[in-house]
Amino acid sequence: MLMRDLHTGVACLDSLRRPLRDLRISVTDRCNLRCTYCMPGEVFGRDFVFLRHADLLSFEEIVRVARQCIALGVRKIRLSGGEPLLRHGIERLVEMLARLCDNDGKPIELAMTSNGTLLAKKARALKDAGLMRLNISLDALDEDIFRRITGNRVSPEAVLEGIAAAEAVGLTPVKVNAVIKRGVNESEILPLVRRFRHSGVIMRFIEYMDVGNTNGWRLDDVVSAGEILALIEREYPLVPIASLTEGEGVAERWALQDGSGEIGVITSVTQAFCHTCSRLRLSTDGKLYTCLFATDGIDLRTLIRAQPGDEVALRQHITAVWRSRADRYSQLRHEMTEALSGRIEMSYIGG
Ligand code: SAM
Ligand code: SF4
Ligand code: SF4
């Protein structure tokens, strides 16, 4: 079904006829971890200059953008970062967004991706505010491997406590996401599967992507979804469940044949589905990005602040951005070996 602009009745399609359905909002560029593939400590150190508070979109400004995106077809909003739980008062933003409805009066799906370390304190408030779904990132159970990946700031126990807290308040089913990088944490694939069997948690493995400039990505570092599945199958035979296109790839779903759980693999690199990609990203400082691999964002904050009450202008601007969208980076990835510099970081626009 095509989503239609409320005023014009014209479907908001991009130049490749993809509808706008999915909005990812980065609420902070800061994080309490320093994952080597995302915000490596050498780059995001003491001297790194993060955005000033005045540069951040306020909650009211975020809601204004979200409302117009919903009018244009968005049905799912995901809060991300940086670490979204570091944004002061995040539960208030969740509450404001949870009140928004689509053109038929139905609530939109409201989700968050978090590293989980602060969830033990925040899960109840997020649930009460109206958060519906939660993805929690956990790349390793082994203490040393986890600390090596995340910059040696917390123990994986903190994330496990966060997962338990999310389950306790009913933010279920929790999805746990692990990015797998060759030579770093493929040894953690089976332990993660074992750990979450019989728990209701859906364990998903993500192919390592070439986002940003700071992670020194090489194709050799990618452990493909095929390899991940083959490894799991050696111990746990798998039965396919319907796949979903999600984010930058396909989320293939598999049931463990013995009935003990579900796992997933996200084929961001080996099977990116640009032709169905319906995601718009809003950065912490109010820029729109029409692709995870975009080099430039389109400033919305100036317009928002210059015309505080002009919702029509805001919607027209977002419409124009979406209509001119032609991104299909992943499909072109193999042809694009140059021009990789200047890409933005995932922690800035939200993974
Ligand atoms: N801090 C939160 C977290 O870690 O869940 C939210 C932001 S983080 C940028 C969102 C997701 O992007 C995480 O699951 C992270 O593992 C993933 N991510 C970051 N860099 C990535 C990369 N180069 N390839 C694949 N996934 C990546
Ligand atoms: Fe922080 Fe998430 Fe990036 Fe790790 S992946 S550094 S937790 S934003
Ligand atoms: Fe969407 Fe860009 Fe990823 Fe293609 S490369 S799936 S257009 S975000």
Image (tube, rainbow, N blue to C red):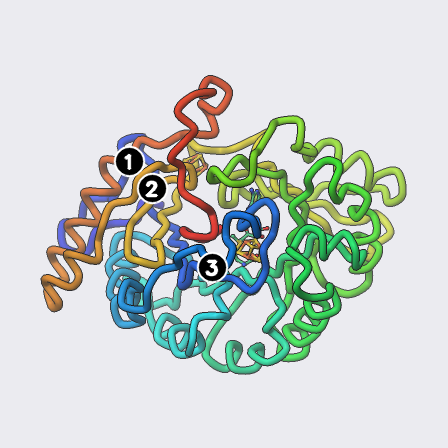
Precedes in sequence: disc 1 or disc 2: 2
**For residue 55, above or below residue 228:** below
Residue 309 image offset from top left, x and y in percent: 11, 68
Find residue 285 and report its image quarter: bottom left
Q: Secondary structure at mark 1?
A: loop
Of the numbered discs in the image, which one, if any, rests on residue 290? Answer: 2
> Image check: 116 left or right of 273?
right
Q: CA distance from mark 1 to mark 3?
A: 22 Å
Residue drawn at 45 percent across, 59 percent down: 78
Of the numbered discs in the image, which one, if any, rests on residue 325? Answer: 1
Task: Using a 10 Å C-alpha cutoff, classify the residue at mark 3 as few (fewer than 14 neighbours), some (14 to 19) or many (20 or more).
Answer: many
Q: Are dots 1 and 3 in contact, CB under 8 Å?
A: no
Q: Amino acid at mark 3?
A: Ser
Q: Amino acid at mark 1?
A: Arg
Considering every residue shown, the one lying at the far top of the view is: 335
Q: Give the residue at mark 3.
A: 80
Classify mark 2 as within 8 Å of ligand 3 or not, answering yes or no. Answer: yes
Tag in front: 1 or 3: 3
Task: Using a 10 Å C-alpha cutoff, classify the residue at mark 2 as few (fewer than 14 neighbours), some (14 to 19) or many (20 or more).
Answer: many
Q: Are dots 1 and 2 in contact, CB under 8 Å?
A: yes
Residue 35 image offset from top left, x and y in percent: 60, 52
Residue drawn at 26 percent across, 52 percent down: 72
Residue 323 image offset from top left, x and y in percent: 23, 38
